[in-house]
Amino acid sequence: MSSKLEELQAMLAPAVESLGYQCWGIEFLSQGRHSLLRVYIDHANGILVEDCEAVSRQISGILDVEDPISAEYTLEVSSPGMDRPLFSLEQFALHAGEQVKIKLRSPFEGRRNFQGLLRGVEEQDVVVLVDDHEFLLPIDMIDKANIIPRFD
């Protein structure tokens, strides 16, 4: 996790949790003049548009005061959805048994993209079974990971 993401997580997660939601994860996509700050929230009862609005109002105030992002950006508050992104080892462990799609920051064993069965975690590695081959992917190398939704 980058230092900017760590700073945003430390600043925003307590505010999200004080409203009764779980801060599932934060993405900051720096795209020049049109950057995006996406905050994923979750709750045992699910997430409604009103929940996203309430969290957005709360963290907008914090962002206005603290001003951690110098460039112009768009704030988006969202539920993780069915193709839930995974950010932490705890989240990977929680979703063991699910199909996942993982993209790495740099190649590992000659590839950056992995799609297969999430077996769990071992120390600082995410264990994924792809075509009968088990890969131990270091959490620090993972750029993006999502659950592949099942419709059965």
Image (spheres, rainbow, N blue to C red):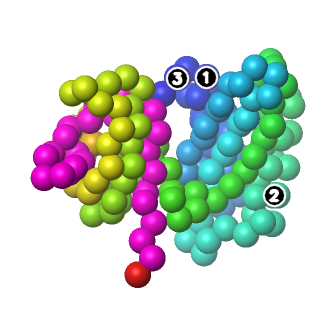
Mark 1 or mark 2, which is nearer the start of the sequence?
A: 1
| Alpha-carbon span between mark 2 and mark 3 | 27 Å
Please check the rendered image and state whether residue 136 is part of the magenta-colored stretch, yes or no: yes
| Alpha-carbon span between mark 2 and mark 1 | 24 Å
Where residue 127 sits, quadrant-wise, is top left
- Identified at 81% across, 66% down, the residue is 50
Asked whether, in this view, residue 81 is left or right of residue 62, the answer is left
Q: Are marks 2 and 1 in contact (CB under 8 Å)?
A: no
Residue, disc 3: 2
Please check the rendered image and state whether residue 78 is part of the magenta-colored stretch, yes or no: no
Residue, disc 2: 54
Asked whether, in this view, residue 13 is left or right of residue 146, the answer is right
- Identified at 47% across, 39% down, the residue is 144
Whether residue 120 can be seen here: no
Say what secondary structure mark 1 lies in.
helix
Q: Are marks 1 and 3 in contact (CB under 8 Å)?
A: yes
Residue 25, percent from left and from top:
56, 45
20, 85: nearer the viewer:
85
Q: In the picture shown, does residue 3 fall above or below 47?
A: above
Asked whether, in this view, residue 28 is left or right of residue 122, the answer is right
Residue, disc 1: 4
